[in-house]
Amino acid sequence: RKKKTLLDFYNMKKRDEKVVWITGYSAPQARFCEQAGVDMILIGDSGGMCLLGYDSTIPVTMEEMIVMSKAVRRGAPNTWIIGDMPFMSYQKSNESAVENAGRFIKAGCDSIKLEGGKCVCSQIRAITDAGIVVYAHLGMTPQSSNSFGGYKAQGRTVNSARAIIEDAYAVQEAGAKFLLLEAVPPEISLYLAEQLDIPVYGIGGGMCDGQLLIISDVIGEFQLFTPKFVKKYASIADTIVNAITEYKKDVQNKTFPEDPLHCYHIFKKHKEGIEKLME
Ligand code: KIV
Ligand code: NA
């Protein structure tokens, strides 16, 4: 299959065809996503929690993001992928933002995503001027969740909604090619999808130009908590725990391994010689 491009996604917005994206952190996950035919894969810094076991996205490093990005590229060679800039990889300066964004592109990403509105517009402009496609992420932005008092939906009050709407116009003006809204009222997403020229996607943002979910939520792998906006399509954790439990029982009951099914036998002409070794 042919990899979709930015123009395809812009045409999908015009035709009101929904873009489907999902996160991925490993080569097998990326392969599953490509087989299912998703439009784009986000290597989210959520991989810090869903794959690496951190209890937030704050500790995630550029090095970890690059390892996951390269794995996803290898697993999904024909899918548009987005590298998620980790905490402190773009906040400090335009120079470090451009340098780190470039590392994602050199690792095989087609684009990058960063969190924030007006406060990161100079970084969005600098990265865009370097020829890199930027996704802006507004609403409940996990890297700054301490300033909201935790993982809380945004845009539910006049002041919060105004801030999101102003930020959305600002990031478009700064050059962002896509906008992602997380955990905001559907009325705001729909309004912005209609008003902005760039595609507006949601995760917990109701219907807009497309949807994102975290793969670990979709397949039922992440066990610590499930946000309200998640729809769970499988319970892979149960499947995996059952498989490992069955394996454990088989070994304890001496029903695995089975000879000859799981065993390598001595070549006939070496049988005598090897038997001699063991006398
Ligand atoms: O890291 C991530 O997966 C994200 C989404 C939750 C939007 O940024
Ligand atoms: Na993220």
Image: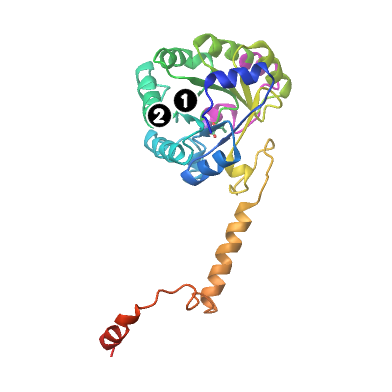
| Up-down relation of residue 132 to residue 26 (above or below) | above
In the rendered structure, the answer to whether residue 274 lies left or right of residue 138 reads left
How far from the left and from the top, in percent, is residue 236?
A: 61, 52
How far from the left and from the top, in percent, is residue 259?
A: 48, 78
Determine the secondary structure under disc 1.
Answer: strand
Q: Is residue 216 visible?
A: yes
Residue that sits furthest to the bottom in the current view: 279
Tell whether circle 2 marks a residue whose Cβ is less than 8 angstroms from ligand 2. no
Which residue carries the number 2 mark?
104
User: In the depicted view, which residue is nearer to us: 85 or 19?
Assistant: 19
| Up-down relation of residue 255 to residue 213 (above or below) | below
Q: Residues within 10 Å of mark 1 (few under 14, many from 20)?
A: many
Which residue carries the number 1 mark?
112
Residue that sits furthest to the top in the current view: 173
Return the disc, 2 or 1, that comes first in the chain's sequence: 2
| Up-down relation of residue 226 to residue 114 (above or below) | below
Q: In the figure, residue 237 lies in which quadrant?
A: bottom right
Determine the secondary structure under disc 2.
Answer: helix
Tag 2: amino acid:
Phe
Cα separation between marks 2 and 1: 7 Å
**What span is in magenta?**
144-164
Instruction: Give the residue drawn at x 53%, y 8%.
Output: 173
Q: Is residue 248 magenta?
A: no
In the rendered structure, the answer to whether residue 259 lies left or right of residue 62 reads right
Tag 1: amino acid:
Ile
How far from the left and from the top, in percent, is residue 276?
A: 26, 88
Asked if the residues shown at circle 2 and circle 1 are in contact, with their CB atoms under 8 angstroms apart, the answer is yes
Query: Quarter for ligand 1?
Result: top right
How far from the left and from the top, in percent, is residue 59?
A: 43, 37
Q: Is residue 116 visible?
A: no
Question: What is the total number of numbered labels drawn onto the structure image?
Answer: 2
